Image (cartoon, rainbow, N blue to C red):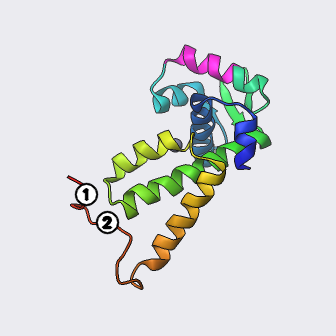
Amino acid sequence: MTEKTSDRNLTSTQEDYLEAILELTEKRVVARNMELSSKLGVRRATVTRALKLLTQKGLVNHEMNGYVTLTDEGKAIARDILARHELFRHFFRDILNLEEDEADEIACKIEHTVSGHALDKFRLFIKRADECEGKCPNSLKLKREEGCK
Ligand SMILES: [Zn+2]
């Protein structure tokens, strides 16, 4: 699944669209151009162009009435990105102890670049840090005020 995303040669922005559509369509069956425009902070014309490309790639169904859904393949890629987002948010928020907003912001950037081998290592490290909590003499989790000055 991880490899699939890179095989497709999607840009970070395109991956963000898939992620945003998944989040919107999980609440309701379809997303609208307007909602994507406000969620991603871009103009509606920009959304329209991006959706056209994603439709050509077979990842999105863009209906004439402005409704947007993900194809099965688009959904698989979006789920993969969202899972990375959640993993990194957990790492930055709960292990490095950053504020939620900051953790979210960083997660949304590196979810596009960390994949494959590095992602597996990250997952393993985070799992170990979680398991260590309360059992190991030195928790791997940082306190809010800890850091190199
Ligand atoms: Zn994200």
Residue 65: image x %, image y %?
69, 22
Label 1: state its secondary structure. Answer: loop
Q: Is most of the magenta stretch helix, strand or loop?
A: helix
Asked whether the viewer can see residue 76, the reply is no
Amino acid type, label 2: Leu
Mark on residue 142? 2
Query: Compared with residue 63, is residue 110 higher up or lower down, i.e. above or below?
Result: below
Q: Is residue 108 left or right of residue 142?
A: right
Near mark 1 (Cα within 10 A), the count class, few <14, some 14-19 or many ≥20, is few
Q: Is residue 143 left or right of residue 30?
A: left
Residue range highlighted in magenta: 43-52
38 or 12: nearer the viewer: 12
The residue labelled by disc 1 is 147
Asked whether the viewer can see residue 74, the reply is yes
Mark on residue 127? none
Q: Quadrant of residue 96?
A: bottom left
Residue at figure coordinates x 27%, y 66% from the top left: 143
105 or 75: nearer the viewer: 105
Query: Compared with residue 101, is residue 12 higher up or lower down, i.e. above or below?
Result: above
